[in-house]
Amino acid sequence: MRPSPTPLRRAARQILSSSFTTIRAAAPAHRSLSSITTTSTGSDCTCGNGRTTARRPQIQSNQNPQQQQQQRSSYHSYDHPSPPASFTPVEESILSAAYLHVPAHGFTSSALVAGARDAGYLDISPTILPEGAFTLIRYHLVKQREGLAARAREVFGGEGHVGAYKLGGLSEGEIKGRVEALMWKASREQGGYWTVAGAIMAQPSYVPPSLKELALLSDEILFLAGDSSVDPSWYTKRVSLSTIYAAAELFMTNDHSPEFMDTRAFLNRRLREVNEVGGVFRNMREWVGFTATAGVNVLRSKGVRI
Amino acid sequence: MVARPALRRVAIPSSLRTSTTHLESRISRSPFSTTLQSRNNQKPNNNNSVPEYAIPDPARPTHFGFETVTEAEKRERVAGVFTSVAESYDRMNDLMSFGWHRVWKDHFVSSLNPGFTPLTAPGSSPLAPQHILDIAGGTGDIAFRMLHNAHVINGNQDVRVTISDINPAMLTVGKQRSSALPASQQAVLSFLEANAEDLTQTKPLGANQVGYSPTNGIPDESVDLYTVAFGIRNFSNIPAALREAYRVLKPGGVFACLEFSKADKHPLFNTIYKQWSFSAIPLIGQLVAGDRDSYQYLVESIEKFPSQEDFRDMIVDAGFVVGGKGYEDLTGGVAAIHKGMKPRRK
Ligand SMILES: C[S@@+](CC[C@H](N)C(=O)[O-])C[C@H]1O[C@@H](n2cnc3c(N)ncnc32)[C@H](O)[C@@H]1O
């Protein structure tokens, strides 16, 4: 089976249209995670900027001390998010066990079945997961996002992002540095199994949910890096980061340079391009290109003649 | 050709369709066993409190297509329909689904991927035996695909399949067709006469009617995968069948159902599809199989089957857990796959 240009183009179009809608759809859920309910902007669900506004340090100073107190504690709860409602307890028990088999089996049905056995279920049990092996990828992205706050503390020391606010805002350059450091940390911790994930994510029906999760992850990276800008570029940056993150992880799977130097250089180049005109679109094209190539490679390794 | 028992109903000509609609709305408000029951709050998997509606009652009203009949009468008349169409069954399926049923069945089976085991799970045997129970298995379409998937694609010969149906005429057609299978597959295939609503009483196909004591029901927790394809809408009491499924499945075992469903998320497509099914299918049934009534029933029974969400809720009520929204639409919802897993014992 040769991937014809049409499905690819369709996938690309889907990326373009869905990234914006999914980001909007994702925003309220994300906000509820950080449980910001006391700010005046917090109830404005239809406005995507509401959530970012609510987190801005400037807003904090406008609030009375009690609200400030709650705001801080919401940050704290943000650092220890309760398990996401995106998985039911049974799904969670199979997926968490299966996740441990990813290094050996990749994001595959084998990992799911091995996990089901560990969790005391049958080989047939994981077939109730509607998205099959993709569910495991979604689980991975959710875990990445949840683990990011801890990583931020590791990378930046102290309280991570909270420290950023104490500094009273960061310069553009500092933020970029922090974004880069965080993304490097996140992708550095991946094994070499991302290729399979990329191939699965490139299937058109999985593109919208992949982007939704990647957008949430990018959102988190920007937030933890201390980027509190509230303007249309927020969306642009998120989309860019999503694609760069996915591309960097894929790049890494073929990177044999010591300490993944090439990947780091790749990551730096891509991040520098974000503010250039057309950078976003180039990145998306690259992501589609990468995942398609990865997909073909995986199929080849499975004996499909392409 | 199998002898065709006279069906006791008269096909409703399309000119009288308005009165049918009237009847339909009356039916959907009544507490019949094939419609969604009001959700009662008792713990679903608590076996000593099986809700009253899930206990088969021959005298309770249910639907037969758009008609109202008792559960016992429905069973008898469904038997009439399938005895009548057993021979033309494959053609009928093609007509009712534009041939899509083959694609749906392939997808259904590959999404369950029977016989699949991780290649190198550390510390555990790679191949695990599985017992698949194909309920309302009729002519074997699903069971044969399951065997192929398990034995050939996954190379797991340790998967056996029981085809069960209430109707010996359908099972006999299935048995004949199975003679074309490889011997290794025939060896693990068995045919069982049973009513899905009560699997404690079963009878191997061809067992002598007289003197046969139906002691060998399907034991509790003996099945890995329970499948039912295009069968459940014909049952007189769906909640009872779901509870039997729950009983025979092992913890972690999966209930999987492929059935015609509601395409009403796409209004235009739905209109065209309904027009086709209500006007053309009974007519073609008459021309191809010389049997309008049976085909009229099949079309009406599709219409009366609960929506995707309602059926999913019935599955959850029976004690199963579902993944995601619990179902997958096929071809815009013309058919749907529902899956549920029997949870592990606490
Ligand atoms: C449309 S056929 C489906 C056959 C096969 N599963 C397929 O997909 O081709 C429906 C079957 O349901 C069976 N059936 C109807 N009521 C039943 C019941 N209460 N218990 C078991 N089988 C039943 C009929 O005898 C018939 O063979």
Image (cartoon, coloured by chain):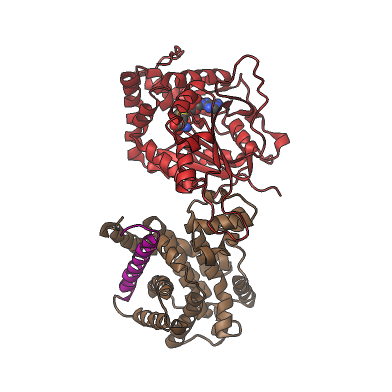
- Name the spot of residue A18 as percent of width and height, x first: 37, 61
Where residue A78 appears, as percent x and y from the top left, is: 59, 71
- Which tint was used for chain A? brown
Chain letter for the red colouring in the rendering: B
User: What is the span of residues highlighted in magenta in the rendered image?
Assistant: A279-306
- Furthest-front residue in view? B183
Q: How many marks?
A: 0
Q: Is residue A98 left or right of residue A239?
A: right
Give x and y (percent) for residue A152. 55, 79
Residue situated in front as seen by the camera: A129 or B33 = A129
User: Relative to residue A305, is residue A141 drawn left or right?
Assistant: right
Tell me if I can see residue B317 in this picture.
Answer: yes
Q: Is residue A64 above or below residue B202?
A: below
Q: Main secondary structure of the magenta part?
A: helix
Q: Residue at x 45, y 70 (%)?
A: A49
Name the outermost residue toward the right: B48
**A233 in relation to B224, above or below:** below
* Residue A231 makes an appearance in the image: no
Residue at coordinates 62% horizontally, 70% vertically from top-left?
Answer: A80
Residue B253, image x and y in percent?
Answer: 60, 44
Q: Is residue A215 left or right of residue B321?
A: left
Magenta residue check for A182: no
Quick one: quadrant of the N terminus of chain A?
bottom left
Residue A303: in magenta span: yes
Looking at the image, which residue is at 44% across and 78% down?
A: A229
Figure quadrant of residue A236:
bottom left
Q: Nearer the viewer, residue B55 or A293?
A: A293
